[in-house]
């Protein structure tokens, strides 16, 4: 399957909000209840920040918000902090039982 | 605390083989689906495959890019997961992660082990 499409980079000043989009198709994002978002700092393993489109695991800040409309999912980070600077990947469980990931978005805190 | 520690990576020539291991602790391995995910340099993650849990008969599924070349196995008595990689290609060069799969998400990840396929 082709990777889900994300913008290469987004940036914002501390305290601002940024939104990352993730576009797929009806065999993944559009047809799946299971869209996740992962944060990855350089040299580290990915960490799940959002699952099932809009749920946050225990311990993840409520500044992270997930949503979906049609074939596009979105991750919004509000109250941007220096520690949020990282790469972010969306992922969808697909109709064939596999996972497909996004191309990745680098979030820069100005 | 859930811990996953991969090992076995290294440099291998095209056409060669390598076996990766993932040592687990902090949870009951028999209860969990376990996945392998890889990430090529500068790229996003790519799902490699999974083994289901004991209740689902330890079935395996693979991405099309590795099917027929890679084999996932597990030894729950040793709390370990394995990835046997044969007929390696240069495009298999990546950091390989093991991860727990929990209700359609990859919950916990190891730190990864690096595989380089080059002559």
Image (cartoon, coloured by chain):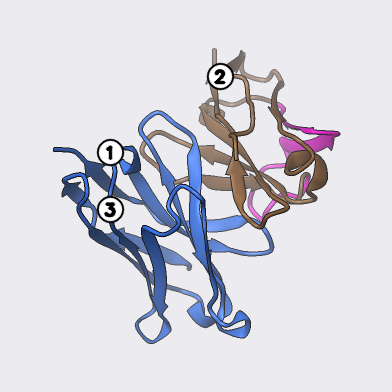
Chain colours: A brown, B blue
Q: Which of B68 and B25 is in front in this view?
A: B68
Q: In which quarter of the image is the N terminus of chain A?
A: top right
**Secondary structure beneath label 3:** loop
Label 1 or label 2, whichever lies nearer to me, is 1
**Separation (CA) of disc 3 from disc 1:** 10 Å
Count of number-bearing discs? 3
Query: Which element type, helix, strand or loop, lies under badge 1?
Result: helix
Label 3 CA crowd tier, 10 Å (few <14, some 14–19, many 20+): some
Q: Is B95 on the left or on the right of B36, as rendered? A: left
* Residue span colored magenta: A54-78
- Is residue B77 within the magenta segment? no
Find disc 3 in the rendering and name its residue. Answer: B87
Location of mark 2 (residue): A8
Which disc is residue B90 wearing?
1
Work out which residue is located at the far left of the displayed protein and give it: B119
What subunit carries mark 2?
Answer: A
**Mark 2 falls on what kind of element?**
loop
Residue at x-position 80% and y-position 50%: A33
Q: Which mark is residue B4?
A: none
Residue at the limit of the structure toward the right, as seen here: A69
Q: Are marks 3 and 1 in contact (CB under 8 Å)?
A: no
| Residue B90 location, quadrant | top left
Q: Nearer the viewer, mark 3 or mark 1?
A: 3
Rendered location of residue A65, percent (x, y): 75, 37
Please report the residue visible at 30 percent of the width from the left and 41 percent of the height from the top: B93
Q: Measured along the vertical axis of the image, is residue B65 above or below residue A20? A: below
Q: Is disc 1 surrounded by few (<14), some (14 to 19) or many (20+) residues within 10 Å?
A: some
Give x and y (percent) for residue B72. Answer: 41, 67
| Chain label for disc 1 | B
């Amino acid at each position: 399957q082709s990777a889900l499409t994300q913008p290469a980079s987004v940036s914002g000043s501390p305290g601002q909000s940024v939104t990352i989009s993730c576009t797929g198709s009806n065999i993944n994002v559009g047809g799946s209840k299971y869209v996740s978002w992962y944060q990855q700092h350089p040299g580290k393993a990915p960490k799940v920040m959002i699952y099932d489109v809009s749920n946050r695991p225990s311990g993840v800040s409520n500044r992270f918000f997930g949503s979906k409309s049609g074939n596009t999912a979105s991750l919004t980070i509000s109250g941007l902090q220096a520690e949020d600077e990282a790469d972010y990947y969306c992922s969808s469980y697909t109709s064939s039982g596999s996972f497909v990931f996004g191309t990745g978005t680098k979030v820069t805190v100005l | 605390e859930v811990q996953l520690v991969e090992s076995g990576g290294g440099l291998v020539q095209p056409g060669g083989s390598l076996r990766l291991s993932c040592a687990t602790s902090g949870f009951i391995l028999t209860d969990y689906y376990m996945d392998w995910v890889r990430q090529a340099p500068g790229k996003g993650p790519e799902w490699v495959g999974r083994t289901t849990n004991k209740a689902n008969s330890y079935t395996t599924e693979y991405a099309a890019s590795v099917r027929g070349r890679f084999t996932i196995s597990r030894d729950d008595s040793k709390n370990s997961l394995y990835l046997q990689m044969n007929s390696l290609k240069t495009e298999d060069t990546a950091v390989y992660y093991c991860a727990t799969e929990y209700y359609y998400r990859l919950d916990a990840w190891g730190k990864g082990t690096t595989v380089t396929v080059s002559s």
